[in-house]
Image: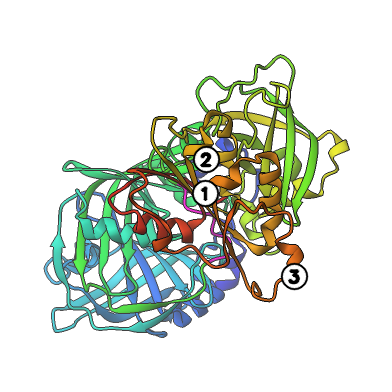
Amino acid sequence: MMASLLTKTVPWHEGEEKVQRLLQVPERDNPTTPCLSPGAGFLVQQAPLLALGTLDSEGRPWSTIWGGTEGFAAPVAETSIGLRTQIDTKYDPVAQSLLGNWDDQHDNYLGKMVSGLAIDLEHRKRVKLYGRMESGSMSHTDPGQAQLVVHIEESMGNCPKYLNKKHIVPAKPDPILISDLPQLIPAAVELLARADTMFVSSSRGTINMDTNIRGGPPGFVRVQSNESSGAVLVYPEYSGNRLYQTLGNLQITPLAGYVVPDFENGNVLYLTGRTELLVGKAASAVLPRSNLAIRVTIDAAFFVQNGLAFRGIPGELSPYNPSVRYFIGERQIPSAQEGSVSDATATMIKKESITPSIKRFRFQISSGHPASWTAGQYATLSFQEELDMGYSHMRDSDPTSLNDDFVRTFTVSSYPGQDIPKDQFEMMIRRNGPVTDYLFQVNERAGLEVPLKGFGGSFRISTAEGITPFIAGGIGITPLLAQLPDLDLSRLRLFWSVPVQDIGLVRDTFQRWPQLPMSTTLFITGAGLDGADRRVWDGLPSETQLVRRRMQAEDLDLTLADRWYLCAGVALKRMVLNWLAGKTVIYEDFNY
């Protein structure tokens, strides 16, 4: 019997086929097995967690996550699994839908749809399950206990991508309902801001269901709005196996249930709502650099304190995780300015070394497209044609490339039309990642031509009266350089922190701007400063105030001005913002 089942196939349903056509996925067989495969049964009994999904009496999908120890679930027959575990018997929506009235309405619950995901986060293993409820019970002791038997009709193993490692340990649930409103309370919003894992359940009407995981960097689920009528969440759909089983369900029945566990303290957020699939430009208009995204309008939510029967000790984040994708306006998200010509190109015509890890690149804009940018803006360039290797399910040699669109923004370091033609611009770039690696390696005579998406940004330094203090970290000097022709250098106070290996950047800058040293306090950092070769300091103007240590709070004279400017990496930026509390700080990020 088992052998014959394993040779059968599960056809794609109309929703899956629609999404696959929409996203131009090549035809392939559905890898789902129409039974509990031996491999699936083995992982069920090895996995310490099992996410479950079902529909409530209103047809809304919900998700939960049970377990805490290996062996709480296991096959009990060739095609059935059984679970016995502590749970929250008061507020868990899946427990209530499956077991809440089992004793009184036994016949109504038999055959109820149940989807599942047996998952071992510590070893990045998972298997999807779908079946129908055979029996179950729930005791309201302290702690509550649940037993459930499910006849499995489908199973399928999944890949380890986007699974952030957790070592699971058991814990006693002691649930307290904090909120049952669709508008998320601050604690729920805070949980989403640091969550790197959630589980989602969807259905194809009343025919079948699917439960799977969504993982990413902490905060990958974004809160777009949070009104009393219900919060609106958006999260990206990363490059995966391209089966689109969840998205296929959402094409048929645009409803989904989510559970967001707090592995640290046992709190849990349950959500159900209406979904909208965002594709292509619709996705990138909401979450820049996303080709696929899901928007969820929450219809019901429960935030339960200490509702989980386990805790998770965090381990390694998935190497496949891309960076968090923020809403436009949520942070200083680079985007081409309105009116930029979309079919313009930029050709690299010159590059020169500043330090071993920093080069200056000059690009020429294609003829017929007027150069239109202001000092302090960035250029957005696409290197997709040069670097995109096409679809791969897994790419362990370069995991982050699977979700990389190879679009990059770099601050323009030249002033429009000064010392170079108006249709040319320069950028100083530090080697950091696949795009900059490519730029550093390509020969300037090769005629590299890439799409110029446009210019953007609004980091402008005021020319009003008074002192203008600017704090720069390393190559964070770039937006200042582009605006120096507009500034009165006698009123500029530059506090510049530079690692000793980038001293060449300082020399180059001071040679180009010989009046700048008189306005500069230079902080040289890095190991071996005391024993540094004297040649390290050769060429630095004597007018520069040189400090051989890290910048400190007392180095900044807060009486200089109420408005300060800052362009630095994450660590220095965080410290400076604390030092300048109460001041207006206009800052630029460069975390590319």
- Tell me the quadrant of the picture where the N terminus can be found: bottom right
Which of the 4 image quadrants contains residue 5? bottom right
Q: 327 or 349, which lies in front?
A: 349
Residue located at (19% from left, 55% from top) = 185
Residue 324 on the magenta span? yes
As drawn, which residue projects farthest toward the left? 104
Q: Is residue 271 left or right of residue 318?
A: left
* Badge 3 element: loop
Label 1–label 2 contact, CB within 8 A? yes
Expressed as whole percent of the image width and height from the top left, the position of residue 258 reads 33, 57
Q: 586 or 316, which lies in front?
A: 586
Expressed as whole percent of the image width and height from the top left, the position of residue 43 reads 50, 77
Q: Is residue 299 left or right of residue 360?
A: left
Q: Which residues are magenta?
A: 318-325
Task: From the image, tell me which residue sits under label 1.
Answer: 244
| Label located before the other in sequence (2 or 3) | 2
Expressed as whole percent of the image width and height from the top left, the position of residue 155 reads 50, 65
Task: From the image, tell me which residue sits under label 3.
Answer: 533
Question: Label 3 to label 1, Cα distance in Å?
Answer: 59 Å
Q: Is residue 337 left or right of residue 235?
A: right
Q: Is residue 3 left or right of residue 176?
A: right
